[in-house]
Image: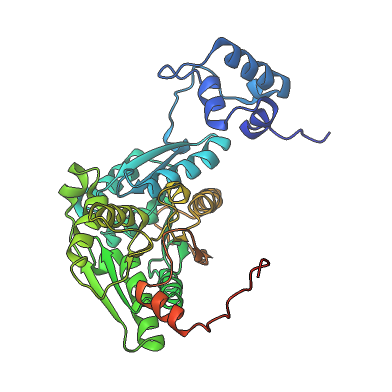
């Protein structure tokens, strides 16, 4: 007799219209959240109808077992990029009855190393590391003990399954877009630029190489400010502040007509500095970001940016991790085959970019003069 497939949270969600996260909390009787009696009855009835209650673990089982816990490492969740990424991972994890534990490192090598050691000691099922590590040796060591997936830049040398994006190509896309609009003098504004933050450097390299090739007479003014782990921990708005302060420094340079910010949060700070100075985006300055946060499509931001496929990368990272967890790799053994999944960057053009102010005037002067249109009354 063929065994019936085990019912899932997704099926209950389709039947009731509620999110998988809400359904999981209701069925697990989470004490820290509450739902209306009508909602609880609807979810419970749907679960019983599908036979989910029979497939669920017994009520006396501990709510968290290391074998069902995924540790997700990110610098911080103040930046919506990481909040969106963690939520995507949780969506996939809850469907498979895994719990997600989020650990913020604030880009501190010491915090990373200690937290990785603690996760290994606790016997977690797996690790998703959502950014290039500040302490690669500690991550590689942890990956020998626990199934691990890295979300990083293309070209990572770590022997770990990786979901990656070509940030060099992303820089090229922004450069070509700005050059097509006549921006030959631009500023690249960024938080800490160093080898440990390779994605930021690769974006800059893509910009610089494109300008050197396509616009040898152009100029990219690089403005960066180092952010310490302590600042990232204490200041929830540090990326916005960096974009704001660096943009203010650049506004005195009359040649600059556009800004390429290292990410959307920094770009918001740039836009605020321009607006506070009584200037306009994009008429006076065009602004681009990287990431394509949900807020970047909203007015008045409407930010031109590069899509980072945040939700897709989160779902894919969890799927890769589940595949690795189900494998037979022994403790202390590196995987024989490393999987790398690449997402190609995609430029999203919105309302924060237009032709450079000087090039608009030149375009008007060069356009042929049309003869006056005769009035029908003439």
Task: Give the residue at the far right of this rendering.
Answer: 1
Image coordinates of residue 241 in percent, x first then y, are 22, 51
Q: Can residue 162 be seen in this view?
A: no
* Rendered image coloring scheme: rainbow
Frontmost residue, 292 versus 361: 361
Q: Quadrant of the N terminus?
A: top right
Residue at point 35%, 48% (across, down): 73
Frontmost residue, 145 versus 292: 292
Image coordinates of residue 325 in percent, x first then y, are 51, 48
Image coordinates of residue 93 in percent, x first then y, are 52, 40
Where residue 137 sits, quadrant-wise, is: bottom left
Residue 62 vs residue 96: left or right?
A: left
Frontmost residue, 165 versus 338: 165
Q: Quadrant of the C terminus?
A: bottom right
Image coordinates of residue 374 in percent, x first then y, are 63, 73
Q: Is residue 267 above or below residue 63?
A: below
Task: Give the residue at the far front of this rendering.
Answer: 378
Residue at point 28%, 52% (across, down): 272
Residue 80 vs residue 88: left or right?
A: left
Q: In this view, does 237 lie above or below 333?
A: above
Where residue 375 sits, quadrant-wise, is: bottom right
Residue at point 42%, 56% (across, down): 303
Q: Is residue 147 above or below residue 16?
A: below
Residue 344 vs residue 375: left or right?
A: left
């Amino acid at each position: 007799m063929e065994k019936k497939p085990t019912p899932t949270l997704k099926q209950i969600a389709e039947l009731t219209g509620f999110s998988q996260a809400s359904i999981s909390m209701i069925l697990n009787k989470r004490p820290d959240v509450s739902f209306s009696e009508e909602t609880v009855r609807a979810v419970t009835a749907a679960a019983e109808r599908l036979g989910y209650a029979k497939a669920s673990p017994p009520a006396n089982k501990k709510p968290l077992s290391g074998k069902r816990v995924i540790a997700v490492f990110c610098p911080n969740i103040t930046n919506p990029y990481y909040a969106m990424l963690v939520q995507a991972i949780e969506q996939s994890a809850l469907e498979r009855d895994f719990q997600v534990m989020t650990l913020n490192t604030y880009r501190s090598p010491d915090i990373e190393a200690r937290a990785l050691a603690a996760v290994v000691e606790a016997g977690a099922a797996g690790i998703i590391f959502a950014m290039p590590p500040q302490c690669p040796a500690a991550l590689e060591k942890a990956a020998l003990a626990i199934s691990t997936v890295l979300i990083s830049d293309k070209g990572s040398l770590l022997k770990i399954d990786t979901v990656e994006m070509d940030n060099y190509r992303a820089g090229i896309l922004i450069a070509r877009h700005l050059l097509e609009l006549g921006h030959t003098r631009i500023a690249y504004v960024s938080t800490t630029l160093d080898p440990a933050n390779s994605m930021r450097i690769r974006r800059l390299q893509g910009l610089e190489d494109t300008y050197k090739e396509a616009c040898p007479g152009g100029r990219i003014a690089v403005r960066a400010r180092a952010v310490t782990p302590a600042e990232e921990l204490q200041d929830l708005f540090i990326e916005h502040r960096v974009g704001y302060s660096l943009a203010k420094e650049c506004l005195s340079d009359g040649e600059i007509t556009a800004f390429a910010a290292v990410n959307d949060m920094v770009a918001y700070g740039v836009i605020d500095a321009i607006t506070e100075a009584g200037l306009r985006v994009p008429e006076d300055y065009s602004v681009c970001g990287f990431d394509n946060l949900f807020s970047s499509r909203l007015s008045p931001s409407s930010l031109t940016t590069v899509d980072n496929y945040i939700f897709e990368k989160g779902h894919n990272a969890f799927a890769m991790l589940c595949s690795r967890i189900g494998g037979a790799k022994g403790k202390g053994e590196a995987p024989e085959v490393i999987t790398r999944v690449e997402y190609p960057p995609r430029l999203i053009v919105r309302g924060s970019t237009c032709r450079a102010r000087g090039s608009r005037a030149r375009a008007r002067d060069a356009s042929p003069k049309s003869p006056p249109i005769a009035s029908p009354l003439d």
